[in-house]
Image (cartoon, grey):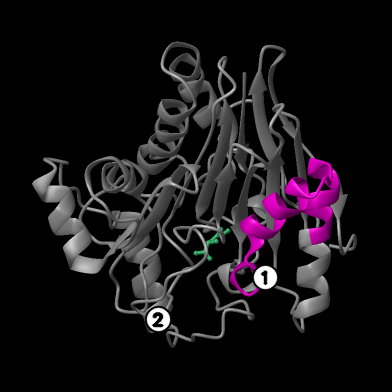
Amino acid sequence: MRIASTWSFGLRANEEAWPHLVSEGALAAVEAACAFADRAPDIDSVGYGGLPDASGRVSLDGCVMLSPARCGSVAGLRSHLHPVSVARRVMERTPHVMLVGPDADAFADAQDLARAELLSPEARATYEKWLREGGTVDQSKDSGLGFEPLRPVDRRHGDDGRLFGGSDGVPADEARWKHHDTIGCLAIDARGVLAGGCSTSGTPFKVPGRVGDSPIIGHGLYVDPAAGAATATGMGELIMGVCGAFLVVESMRRGASPLDAVRDAVERIAKTYPLEPHHQAGFIAMGRDGRVASAALRPGYRTAIRDAEGARAVEPDFVAIPEV
Ligand code: SD4
């Protein structure tokens, strides 16, 4: 049994998920991990607390996957906090894979999932400051907020799993990356069942309607019991062009180790795009035997792992561009 989640805030999500992994299995575990990150007020930008799009409204995306024949996805939720839970119902209760926009919220209502306010007062204040300062959409530049929103950096191993934090004791170099947005989570249970979940509020101040890799099967998440599982984080536009998570799993299907598979994916991104300093991407791969490896385009990404040996946040096994 093992669970692996993106970023060191995944430590706490994994801890929340572990009892579910033991008693209910991998699917319940990834749903619990993502839901924890969605609602935890001190995990800055997954779910509640996430920065809104350029129109000032938060939208949430997510997906869940057991196999190519069993997956579900939602994008553009504006009034439900837990995309993975909505996606699980799409998978289990409809003949479809993906629902989007207001109809996805309506589906969640019909499933009796509770509505929630998604925009926190802090996120609203940050958005208003962004607007006052010109509302630039060039996120490659520090927009005056004191951070560069599109290049998340995980600079701290915290035993509380808190990655970005507020001002209470979080080092300034970490706080400036506080508005990163995704949990990707892979789990294998005692029966050897693999499952994955991914939840995000996307990129800050995105064009309304923009959807990144996270809810797209094969981009932010892919699981095939015959080959392995993978999830991604970072700038979705980099991950989508190479079908990132699918690429990782297909490498494992052809015999690559989890490490070789994630290395190949970040190298592919490095070769494919004219990279800018704010670009970051990270992958976790889990083999059919539960072996885990991770890789990132740049330093500053960590993977949270929980298994019988305990909990830890580990540096990526491979970094494509080692300089910060
Ligand atoms: C997206 N991949 O919407 C997500 C965002 C993310 O670190 O992972 N940020 O593109």
Quadrant hosting ligand 1: bottom right
Q: Position of residue 260 (x, y in %)?
A: 86, 49
Amino acid identity at mark 1: Val
Is 212 displayed left or right of 123 in the figure? Answer: right
As drawn, the label of residue 164 is none
For the point 49% across and 49% down, the residue is 68
Which residue is disc 1 drawn over?
242
Is 90 displayed left or right of 210 in the figure? Answer: left
Q: Nearer the viewer, residue 140 or 259?
A: 259
Whether 214 is among the magenta residues is no
* Residue span colored magenta: 239-264
Q: Is residue 322 above or below residue 26?
A: below
Which residue is disc 2 drawn over?
207
Please, which residue is most extreme toward the right here? 322
Q: Position of residue 207 (x, y in %)?
A: 40, 81
Q: Main secondary structure of the magenta part?
A: helix
